[in-house]
Amino acid sequence: MLNNTDILETIKMIQEENLDIRTITMGISLLDCISPDIEKTCARVYDKITRVAQNHVKTGKDIEKRYGIPIINKRLSVTPIAAILATACDPVRLALTLDQAAKETGVDFVGGYSALVQKGFSPGDLELIKSIPDALSVTERVCSSVNIGSTAAGINMDAVRLMGDIIIEAARKTADNSYFGAAKIVVFCNAVEDNPFMAGAFHGFGEPDAVINVGVSGPGVVRAAVAKMPDANIDQIAEQIKRTAFKITRMGQLVGSEASRALGVPFGTVDLSLAPTPAIGDSVAYILEEIGLEKCGAYGTTAALALLNDAVKKGGVMASSHVGGLSGAFIPVSEDAGMIAAVKAGALCLEKLEAMTAVCSVGLDMVAVPGDTSPEIISAIIADEAAIGMVNNKTTAVRVIPAIGMKEGEIIDFGGLFGSAPIMAINKFSPLKFINRGGRIPAPLQSLKN
């Protein structure tokens, strides 16, 4: 349990170093809402969400007041909607139902407009994926994800090819809203069932009927801790990060336990991921620079990020009975002031970001690309990132925003936690023939690894 010293130290972190709980996310199973009649399914979905989550936001606010801990987002995740679709129905009806339920409960976002297609498509999967641009253009709080690969199954290249078109269409349909439809789509390899973060959260099939998962934050706290050690060696830096991650995670454990008790819903996991914000100092990139890089993206960045990610996990896992989700260090370009500065300075490019994703969670996140980027290039970016996840048996993802009508070097302003994204240069040599071959990249060997 936390003692008074821990609490006082946590208060200092909150007041001076941007520490917060990024999200408490309630996962809700919708498997008992399935009906061959879409109207009945929608009614059951709305009734269950609004009943189970009716006190979710209030509970989060009560915990904020009681402990003085900022909880930035209160969110929901649901069973992948493709799994509950009746045949020959309009998935957008369910998206609108999710949006209405999210507004009624007061949550910021609801994740789970999702399909898991790593080995192939069911009719419901295809219906849902094709509907994503329309669904995200007519809803405010619905987020979507598609899992196109896994270490066990390989990579579904037909799904990869399809998602290039879907992402561009989602950006086009929300061009009057900073292409925000594309910002609410994540394409995964090795998606996890207990992720509390958007846009990729969904309620997995192995989860309870309802569950509370917590996502912590804390890049500013880690940076401040490292800044106090200008002459330390790497071993000492790693130890300091571990100790700091332990303290951050204890706060997440406290919040999750309190929310679980108040709501009468099981406590699932604490996700250890360092989630940055556009606030000055609250940046993963600035941690890496504090470790000793002139600018994030310089040679050595991948090694420094590997050190950070490992130390965060080792420290956090001792602080909570149940650690899960993604757990690492997010490197979203638009949401991290240091990443934005590094891109603008020319230190950080898309290829370096891809290399960094091999050692952190989760992947190419909130990356804006020129509006004339072709669907096959988007698909190839997804395929590359999925290959990193598949071979390394880790979760990887792509959340890329084609800025229709905009060019490299221009800035998209999303506002709030989503920040602003400089449009990054891309390699324009064509992968069209590779992407159009379709089929499935076979799963890697699970033995004989060197």
Image (spheres, rainbow, N blue to C red):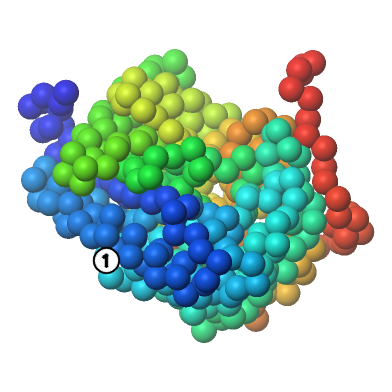
Give how far across and how far down residue 141 sits, in percent.
41, 68
The part of the image, by quadrant, that contains residue 122 is bottom right
Left or right for 296, reference 276: right
Q: Closest to the observer: 308 or 130?
A: 130
Q: Amino acid at mark 1?
A: Gly
Q: Closest to the observer: 264 or 227?
A: 264
Q: Hey, which residue is sitting farthest front in the picture?
A: 36
Q: Closest to the observer: 109 or 357?
A: 109
Give how far across and how far down residue 360 sits, in percent.
54, 36
Give how far across and how far down residue 224 sits, in percent.
30, 36
Give how far across and how far down residue 142 sits, in percent.
45, 66
- For mark 1, what is the residue? 106
Label 1 SS: loop
In the picture shown, does residue 32 fall above or below 409?
above
In the picture shown, does residue 173 fall above or below 115?
below
The N terminus: image quadrant: top left
* Residue drawn at 51 percent across, 64 percent down: 35
Left or right for 421, reference 211: right
Q: Closest to the observer: 64 or 356?
A: 64
The C terminus: image quadrant: top right
Instruction: Judge whether residue 407 can be spotted in this image.
Output: no
